[in-house]
Image (cartoon, grey):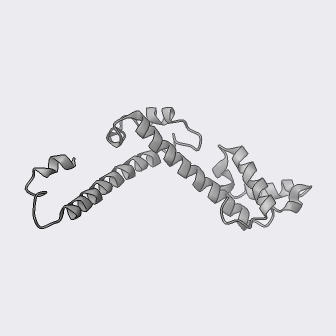
């Protein structure tokens, strides 16, 4: 794209140094990429009923392929799939952090609940809607509970 600009009067202006022109061009390209990325992320958010923590790209692609934001995002499927996987990883990380915050807020999960109080502690946690954020990843939820029990909730993040 920069090559196309080199012959134009606007690019050849003596008012800006070459370095300044390149900096402004890089800023402009970054803004365009950000806007394109935001459009794709908005498309994935709107397809929330299709996108879950474990949904493969092929299923999501079938649901969103007719949207213009899908076609405009990348030139090839690998780029779109990589963007989707980054998005899904962010959603999973957010779910982990939400669940971890639930554990930190509840004092009912401690090392001492490993005996008879364990079921009671879980029943209390299940009443909170944040308990369900990891329904699609029950092993992950169990691992976070075990990790919380081991560290006593002293870490800020899972």
Residue 26 versus residue 42: which sits nearer the camera? 26
Question: How many labels sit on residues?
Answer: 0
Residue 21 relative to residue 88: left or right: left
Residue at the (22%, 64%) spot, across then down: 20
Q: Residue placed at 26% from the left, 61% from the top?
A: 23
Viewer-nearest residue: 129 or 149: 149
104 and 4: which is toward the camera: 4
**Horizontal side of residue 76 vs 111, given as left or right:** left
**Image location (x, y in percent) of residue 24:** 24, 61
Residues 94 and 7: in front is: 7
**Left or right, 139 with reference to 17:** right
Give x and y (percent) for residue 141.
Answer: 71, 50
Furthest-front residue in this view: 18
Q: Quadrant for residue 115, please give it.
A: bottom right
- Figure quadrant of the C terminus: bottom right
Whole-percent x and y of residue 123?
79, 55
Question: Residue at left 36%, top 54%?
Answer: 34
Look at the picture and state if 76 lies above or below 3: above
């Amino acid at each position: 794209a920069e090559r196309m600009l080199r012959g134009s009067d606007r690019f050849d202006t003596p008012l800006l140094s070459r370095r300044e022109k390149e900096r402004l061009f890089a800023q402009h390209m970054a803004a365009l990429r950000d806007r394109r990325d935001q459009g794709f992320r908005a498309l994935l958010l709107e397809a929330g009923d299709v996108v879950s923590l474990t949904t493969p790209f092929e299923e999501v692609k079938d649901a969103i392929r007719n949207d213009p934001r899908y076609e405009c995002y990348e030139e090839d499927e690998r780029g779109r799939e990589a963007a989707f996987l980054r998005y899904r990883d962010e959603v999973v990380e957010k779910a982990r952090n939400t669940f971890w915050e639930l554990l930190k807020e509840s004092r009912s999960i401690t090392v001492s609940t490993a005996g008879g109080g364990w079921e009671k502690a879980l029943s209390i946690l299940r009443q909170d809607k944040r308990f369900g954020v990891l329904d699609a990843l029950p092993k992950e939820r169990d691992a976070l509970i075990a990790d919380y029990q081991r560290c006593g909730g002293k870490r800020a993040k899972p």
